[in-house]
Amino acid sequence: QSALTQPASVSGSPGQSITISCTGTSSDVGGYNYVSWYQQHPGKAPKLMIYDVSNRPLGVSNRFSGSKSGSTASLTISGLRTEDEADYYCCSHTSSSTRIFGGGTKLTVL
Amino acid sequence: QVQLQESGPGLVKPSETLSLTCTVSGGSINTYYWSWIRQPPGKGLEWIGFIYFNGGTNYNPSLKGRVTISVDTSNNQFTLRVSSVTPADTAVYYCAREGRPYDSSGWFDPWGQGALVTVSS
């Protein structure tokens, strides 16, 4: 199974909004509302930010939001802060009941 | 709250079998799916496979039958084995709990802190 497609990097200034895309197929992203997003700071374990396309776990800022259109899911971060600088990964359930991650996106807050 | 901790050798020789155990504390291993995920140095995340508390499993087809995951409900642990390892299997290995009870929708929370396994002679 090939990784979901994410941009290698995105950047934004403090206070701005950015969106990270995650493109798959009808066998994964497009076929299920089971997309999740993770934030990973260097040397740390990933942290769940969004699950089931658009749900936020308790404790995650409402500056983080998720959506999906067809086979492309998106993570939007509004009101960028320096602490948002990290790697972000999407993940989807697949038609084979496996899970597949995106290649990851490095967010730089300028 | 539930916490996960990986344990096992940090160095494995090529062609041998990598073995890691994840110990679950603060909650029961029952009713959930439990996954292993790895991350080679400087690279992205790769899902390895999951096990359900009743022993049902599913694996990443790209690992070509080298992976086995087992569960020990009496000790609240699950174990990963990867056979015939090569340097390409060098990675930080994470264990994680999936989603909601009885649910295999594939989101991971919480995660263990990760264990670096190096494959080298």
Image (cartoon, helix red, strand yellow):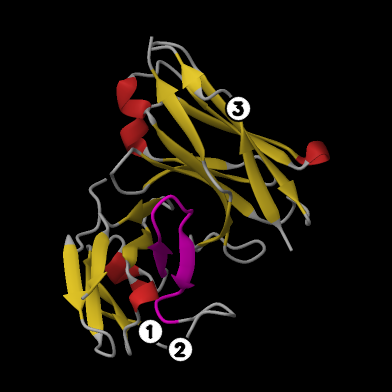
Q: Which residue is mark 1?
A: A65
Q: Which residue is mark 2?
A: A62
Q: Residue at x 23, y 82 (%)?
A: A18
| Residue A26 in view here | no
Asked whether the residues under the numbered discs 2 and 1 touch, taking CB atoms below 8 Å apart as contact, a structural biologist would say yes
In magenta, the rendered stretch is A35-54
Cα separation, mark 2 vs mark 3, equals: 38 Å
Q: Residue at x 60, y 52 (%)?
A: B33
| Residue B67 in view here | yes
Q: Is label 2 on the same chain as label 1?
A: yes
For numbered disc 1, what is the local secondary structure? strand
Q: Which residue is mark 3?
A: B8
B104, above or below A11, in the image = above
Q: Residue at x 18, y 64 (%)?
A: A9
Asked whether the residues under the numbered discs 2 and 3 touch, taking CB atoms below 8 Å apart as contact, a structural biologist would say no
Q: Is residue A39 magenta?
A: yes
Where's residue A106, x and y in %?
25, 62
Q: Is label 2 on the same chain as label 3?
A: no
What is the three-letter code of the residue carrying label 1?
A: Ser
Query: In front: A99, or B56?
Result: A99
